[in-house]
Image (tube, rainbow, N blue to C red):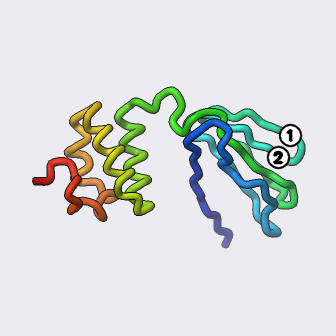
Amino acid sequence: MEAFGINAYRATSAGDPVIEAHVESPGQEELYLVVAGSAEITVGDEAITASAGTAVFVPDPTVKRGGKALEREAGEHRDTAIISYRLACCHARLGETDLALNELCCAIEINGDFAARAQADEHFASIHDHERWPGAA
């Protein structure tokens, strides 16, 4: 049986590192996927400009690799409700309550339908009782 893991990284500003320069343990292949924005992924001596949707596979664990953001974390779509909502989910799961609530309130301000969605979303279970929770008395 073989296994794999998934890690997620983000950057708040262009130029921020997203993947530290490193080599992997023996036998560890890696796949990098840019979900939003764009990044420069360096594999050995090659610099790859990767926009959202680009996947970069590194089969050789001995090759040094790293990456940096080329634009802010959500790119040109940062002011959409779904991006704020997804960031709120991530912050909540990381225990970053204030950031989660700020992003959630932003999402709801843009699109009020996200208030009901958040009530049932398990990502927010740890902060439902917070005094700043949207709709709290």
Identified at 47% across, 29% down, the residue is 77
- Which residue corresponds to mark 1? 46
Q: Among all residues in the image, which is located at the extreme right?
A: 45
Residue at the spot x=22%, y=35% of the render? 112
Picture residue at 51% right of the left edge, 36% below the top:
74
Identify the image quadrant of residue 81: top left
Q: Position of residue 4 (x, y in %)?
A: 64, 64
Q: Secondary structure at mark 1?
A: strand
Which residue was labeled with disc 2? Answer: 43
1 and 2 marks in contact (CB < 8 Å): yes
Q: In x, y percent, where is residue 131?
A: 20, 58
Question: Left of 5 or right of it: where is 80?
Answer: left
Q: Is residue 60 left or right of residue 5?
A: right
Residue at x-position 57% and y-position 47%: 10
* Residue in front for this viewpoint, 64 or 28: 64
Q: Quadrant of residue 33?
A: top right
> Label 2 sits on what residue type?
Val
* Left or right position of 88 against 69: left
